[in-house]
Amino acid sequence: MTSPSNFATHEVFNQPPALEGYNLFTSDRVLAETVEREGAGDAAASLTAFGAKLGTAEVIDLGRQANTYLPVLKSFDRFGHRTDRVEFHPSYHQLMALSVEQGLQGSPWEHLLTGGQPQPGAVVARLAGTYMMTQIEAGHGCPITMTNAAVPALLFQHDLAKEWVPRILSRKYDGRFIPAKEKTGVTFGMGMTEKQGGTDVRANTTVAEPVGAGGPGAEYRVTGHKWFFSAPMCDAFLVLAQAPGGLSCFLMPRFTPDGEVNPIRIQRLKEKVGNRSNASSEVEFQAASAWLIGEEGRGVRNIIEMATYTRLDCAVATAGMMRQAVAQAVHHCSYRTVFQKKLIDQPLMANVLADLALETEAATALSFRVARSFDRAESNEQEAAFRRIMTPVAKYWVCKRAPNLAYEAMECLGGNGYVEEGIAGRIYREMPVNAIWEGSGNVMCLDVLRALSREPDALNVVIDELETSRGANRAFDGALDALKDAFTDLAGLEGRSRQIVEMMAKLEAGAILIRHAPEYVSDAYCATRLGRDWGDIYGTLPAGVDQRAILERARVVR
C-alpha cells in the first residue's frame, strides 16, 4: 500500500520561474537609453543600485504584502477616545522608506536647501526611479508623488516653504504619528474635491474663516468635508476652501503648533477597485487649523501648480506599469511551451507581444520627453511652452492606453494571470486610477485647449519639434499634415479635442522614436499608429514588421 506521504500525483513542469532577482534599470534597454537621452545620464549609477534593490525577491514580495494586508481605519482607541488614525502593514512603511531614501519624494528640489541651481536632469532621474518603483508597488506612490508636487505650491508662501520644505527633502522616512517638528521627515497629501462638485472645485462649500486679520501665511479655521482625501496619515495637506476672498489654498497640518491633533475626522476609507495599499478617505474638518498659501481667491492657481507635477507622475508611473506588464508577459511566454513550441515563438503570440512592446516604448518615450521639459522650463521659454501643452497630452494618452494593454498582457499569462499570487491582476486594477485622478480624460483635453487659447504660439513650439522628424516616414508625414489641418478648422474644436489630443500624443511619440529608436521600432509604430486604423486590439501588426527584434528589445536582460 502506498504511503500518503509518498503519494505524488504529478510533477510540476512547463511553468516559468518567477521574474525576480534582476535589475529593473540595467535589464530595461529602453529605460536606460531614455534616461541618457533626456539628460539624466549622471544618475545611471544611482538608478542601477536602486534597480538592483527593487528586483530582489524580498522587495518584490513587499508589494504583494502591502496589497494583501490593507490599511485599517482606527477611529477610536480602546477607551473610546477619538484617534482618526490609519494602520498600515509594515511592508507599506518599508516601501515608503525605500522611495524616500531614493529621493522620490522631492530630490529635484534639493537645490533649495543650498540656494544653488537645480541639478541637470533631476526631474528625469527622479521619475526613472518612480518608473521602476511603480512596477513593484504603485499605491504607496500616491503620497510620494503628492509630497514632491507640494513643493512648488508651497513656494507661493515663503514662510511656510521655509518651515516645511526642508522636512520634505529629508531622505529619512518617519511613519510615526507625532507632530512634524519632532520627525526626521514628512509627507504631504491634498484635499480638493467634494461630493457636490468633483472636478468643479469652484463649487466647493468648505469654508475657511481667518483667526485674526487673515491674509497670506495667516491662520484660518476650516470647516467642511472632502470626498476624496488620499493618504490621510500624511503630516500635512494642501486643501481648497472658500475664504472671504474666494476659493483659496491652505496648508493643513495633521497636528497644530501646540502639539494637539488637528480635528481632521476620517469618516471612512474608500473601497477602491485598485490602489488598495494606499488609504484614500472621506474626511470632515471641524474648525481645523490651516494656513493660507498666497492670497485669498488664488486657490486654483496654487493647487494646479501641484497638480501639474502629479499629472506628469501619472503618465510616467503608468508607463512603468505598462513595462512591468509586458516584461511579465514576455518572460512567461519565453518559458511556456504550447503545441511543441515556446509561446513566444508562436506567430500570433509574437504579434501580440511585439505590439504591446511598441505601445510601451512609445509611452515611455512620450512621458520622459515631457519630463525633460520640466527640467528645462525655468531657463527655456520653448520648453516651458512645451510643458504646458504636452503634460496633459501625455497624461491623457498614456493613461488611456494602459488598461487595455494590462488586460492583454494578463491574457498572455492565461489563467496564471488571473489569480492573485501574481502581479498581473494588481496592475490591471491599478491602471484606471491614473486616468481618473488629477483630471480625467476630458479635463486633460480641455486643459490643452485652454492652454492653446491663452498661448497660441505654444502650438508652434510643438509643431516645430514634430517637423524635425519629417521626411523619415511617410505615415508620420501624413499624420502631421492632418494634425495641422485639424487646427485650421476651429469650429467644434472642443467636441473634437479627444481626437486632436490623441494625434498630438501619437505624433510626438512617433517623432521621438524616429529620431532615437531603432528603425524597426519607429517604422512599426508609425505604420500602425499613424498610417492606418490598426484597431483597438493588440496583435494586428502587419507583415514586414520585425517582431523578433522588437521582442528582443523588450526582453528583460539578465
Image (cartoon, helix red, strand yellow):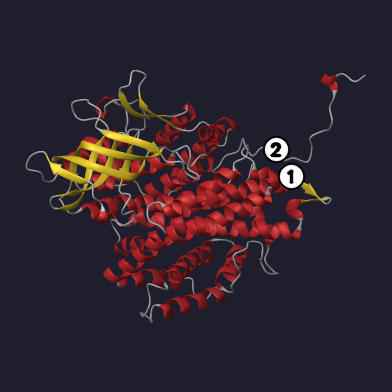
Taking the image as drawn, is residue 32 in sight?
Answer: no
Mark identifier at residue 17: 2
| Label 2: which secondary element | loop
Residue 398 vs residue 119: left or right? right
Residue 540 position within the rendered picture, expressed as x and y whole percent measured from the top left: 66, 66
Q: Quadrant of the N terminus?
A: top right
Question: Mark 1 = which residue?
Answer: 335
Circles 2, 1 touching at the beta carbon (< 8 Å): yes
Image point (17%, 44%), residue name: 208
Q: Amino acid at mark 2?
A: Pro
Give above or below for 236 relative to 431.
Answer: above
Residue 435 position within the rendered picture, expressed as x and y whole percent measured from the top left: 45, 55
Which numbered disc, 2 or 1, marks the residue that appears first in the sequence?
Answer: 2
Residue 376 position within the rendered picture, expressed as x and y whole percent measured from the top left: 34, 56
Image point (47%, 79%), residue name: 481
| Residue in front for this viewpoint, 530 or 79 | 79
| Residue in front for this viewpoint, 70 or 16 | 70
